[in-house]
Amino acid sequence: MKYKLFLILPLLVLVLSNNSQGSIPPGIILPKDVPGDYPEPIEIRIIRIEEDGGLEVIQYSPDGKFLAAGGYFGIYLFNTQTREKVYQIKGNTGHTWCLAFSPDGKTLASGWHSSDTIHLWDVATGTHRDSIIVHRSTTYSLAFSPDGEALASGGTEGYFISDGQKVSIGGLHLWDANTGHLLHRLKGHERSVTGVAFSPDGKTLVSGSYDATLRFWDSQTGKPLRKITGRVVSEGVAFRPDGKKLVSWGLRGGIFIWDVETGNLLHNLKRVTTDTDDVLYSVAFSPDGKTLASASAAAFRLWDVSTGSYLHSLPKPRNMRPSSVAFSPDGKTLASAGRSGTILLWDITPPALPEDVNGDGIVNILDLVAVANAFGNMEPDLNGDGVVNIQDLVIVANAFGNTVAAQ
């Protein structure tokens, strides 16, 4: 062991001395709140919609085989392997405002602007399965319960006049997903309900509204549990996959990450632009819950959930106006849509870091020790010469401090 440490220490001194002038060693990733220093995602393909009019929403099927896109033209379904159109659903009274796949992936629910009907579609064939007459105007958000037995819808139930202004009345309902029968009408929101989401265990429904409240409901009984008041007019809500955190966002109010158990605000993700027209439209958790993606009028952005830090923006065509984002179920692809009628698919798989021998996410002294202890063996053979030796130790030493890119 003394011999191995004797090899390690001089290499450490060499690496540190080479960077003593304060420059950043090649390949070292800057802190997460510094924009632009992460590898840009790879553009896989652009899918252009034939009709005029843009996209409002995109959703992956639970198995990741399909990507549904909704907007002014109706609904498109794409095969994610071939990236070809499977079919298009047309002929509805308004443009598609929201989509939700059932947990088994067999049914797609859609809500339409200026329509009082939720439509249920057979995913395999694109045929109309059922209709639910719901609100008097727009359905803003839909969510299936994790067991697929219930469907939550949020939107408007009408309007009233206040000081000469037309003000919407909130509507929030729970439906039997199999029969379309109303289970509960949830009362409490004073304005349009713009976001609904079930907790991963299915016991709780959360709703966001233009009345600037988040409300928690018992999904079985429909009874109110608690509310969070006074932060921002909500445009949408989503649970982190483990159910411990909740994100809400508003058109001009930023992104908020909440502790579900306490209701405390954990992070207020500040804007990274001074553009007053940078309206926020969509936010999504990655499947591992570590990253948030957002779509605003100016850019698609990625955020670190644990710290609330801005990671980086995703490049986009100049004429593309972002409107929606969705992670693939395996977390390797981010789909992003725009009102230009374009879908971008980004490969966001973090690059491999072979020098991180012990897999703790950073190249450090532990990796140097692991390589030294493996001298003469066949693994970890970093340079591919068939044996672990001093050259592999040098490779690790030169990568000292590198970290795996955040997902």
Image: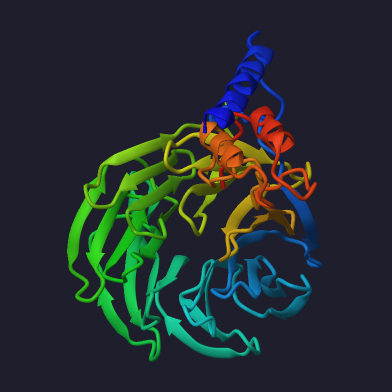
**Side of 50 relative to 19 (left or right):** right
Q: Quadrant of residue 50?
A: bottom right
Identify which residue, 267 or 281, lies in the foreground: 267
**Side of 407 relative to 242 (left or right):** right
Q: Quadrant of residue 172?
A: bottom left
Q: Horizontal and vertical percent for residue 248?
A: 40, 49
Q: Quadrant of residue 367?
A: top right
Q: Horizontal and vertical percent for residue 96?
A: 59, 68
Identify which residue, 222 or 312, lies in the foreground: 312
Identify which residue, 31 or 296, lies in the foreground: 31
Colour scheme of this structure image?
rainbow
Task: Please tell me whether residue 42 is drawn above or below residue 186 in the rendered image.
Answer: above
Q: Residue at x 71, y 34 (%)?
A: 390
Identify which residue, 65 or 59, lies in the foreground: 65
Task: Please tell me whether residue 236 is drawn above or below residue 371 in the rendered image.
Answer: below
Find the residue positioned furthest to the top.
Answer: 21
Q: Horizontal and vertical percent for residue 345?
A: 71, 57
Q: Is residue 160 in sight in this rendering? A: no
**Side of 380 relative to 229 (left or right):** right
Q: Residue at x 73, y 42 (%)?
A: 315
Q: Is residue 146 in sight in this rendering? A: yes
Q: Residue at x 39, y 87 (%)?
A: 180
Q: Horizontal and vertical percent for residue 9?
A: 58, 22
Q: Residue at x 66, y 17 (%)?
A: 14
Q: How many marks?
A: 0
